[in-house]
DNA sequence: GTGGTCAAGCAGGTTC
DNA sequence: GAACCTGCTTGACCAC
């Protein structure tokens, strides 16, 4: 992007065929790669013209050319015309309208093309590519975000697993539960357990022999919790 | 020389 | 079926 194109441009352009040299061949648009080969390069682009004056809109000749395009410009075609670089002013205006609207109606496209002295097709392509870039950037951001999420979830998972291991290692005795009425410890037989805990408790009896299933990490946080 | 950027091409899908 | 879109690719240009 480090375009060398001049800044502070006006919407005027030293376009061959528009201003002075009305050159019949002036057109250097997209499809024109054929034959003349480097016509574009000669006139070109963002280079200051030999005289040192720059051309503000390097290539946007709008008229005629449809026939030529078919001929030369295919991706598989013999050659592609030299690359168009939009001027800063063109880019600015395009960006501006992109901010307002990510898609263009045919009328808007036409108007913008006239304003920028580009072909409608070029405006259209610019918007297509711009949308694609926006989407790509967004996808990259989402990707970063998801990576961060993954990182913290992994960390959390590790932490919880450690906790589970610790709890298993502690192999706590059945919790002591006080009667709400007498304030005396209840016998184990009087306790009712939630199904999940019941499984764990039952396992306690045979813990030495049977491996336990992974416990729900959110539940056994407080080994001495009263039920 | 290499990699990034970007205009522009094409194929295939969608919408009206 | 034309117009438009997305997705992918190509090739010119540029900076390093």
Image: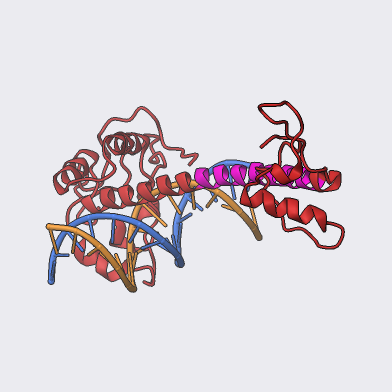
Chain colours: A red, B orange, C blue
User: Compared to A207, does A115 lie above or below?
Assistant: above
Q: Residue at the location (82% across, 58% down)?
A: A206
**Residue A128, magenta (yes or no):** no
Q: Residue at the location (71% across, 38% down)?
A: A221
Instruction: In this rendered view, identify the residue nearer to me: A160 or A173.
Output: A173
The tally of labels here is 0
Residue A35 image-quadrant placement: bottom left
Q: Quadrant of the C terminus of chain A?
A: top right
Q: Is residue A102 left or right of residue C16?
A: left
Residue A80 image-quadrant placement: bottom left
Q: Is residue A186 visible?
A: yes
Considering the whole magenta stretch, tell me its main secondary structure.
helix
Q: Residue at the location (76% across, 29% down)?
A: A184
Q: Is residue A209 left or right of residue B2?
A: right
Q: What is the x, y in percent for residue A224?
A: 76, 35
Residue A220 image-quadrant placement: top right
Region of the chain picked out in magenta, as a range: A140-165
Q: What is the x, y in percent for residue C6?
A: 35, 57
Q: Residue at the location (84% across, 46% down)?
A: A171
């Amino acid at each position: 992007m480090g375009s060398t194109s001049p800044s502070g441009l006006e919407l005027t352009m030293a376009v061959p065929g528009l201003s002075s040299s009305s050159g019949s061949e002036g057109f250097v648009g997209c499809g024109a790669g054929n034959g003349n080969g480097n016509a574009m390069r000669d006139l070109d682009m963002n280079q200051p013209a030999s005289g040192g004056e720059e051309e503000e809109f390097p290539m946007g000749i709008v008229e005629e050319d449809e026939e030529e395009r078919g001929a030369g410009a295919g991706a598989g075609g013999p050659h592609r015309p030299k690359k168009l670089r939009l001027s800063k002013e063109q880019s600015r205006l395009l960006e501006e309208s992109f901010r307002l609207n990510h898609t263009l109606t045919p009328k808007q496209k036409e108007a913008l093309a006239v304003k920028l002295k580009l072909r409608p097709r070029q405006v259209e392509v610019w918007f297509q590519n711009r949308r694609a870039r926006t989407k790509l950037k967004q996808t990259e951001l989402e990707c970063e975000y998801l990576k961060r999420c993954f990182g913290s979830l992994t960390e959390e998972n590790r932490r919880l697993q450690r906790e589970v291991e610790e709890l298993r290692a502690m192999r706590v005795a059945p919790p002591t539960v006080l009667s709400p009425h007498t304030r005396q410890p209840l016998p184990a037989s009087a306790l009712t357990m939630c199904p999940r805990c019941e499984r764990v408790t039952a396992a306690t009896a045979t813990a030495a022999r049977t491996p336990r299933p992974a416990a729900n990490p959110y539940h056994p946080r407080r080994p001495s919790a009263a039920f």
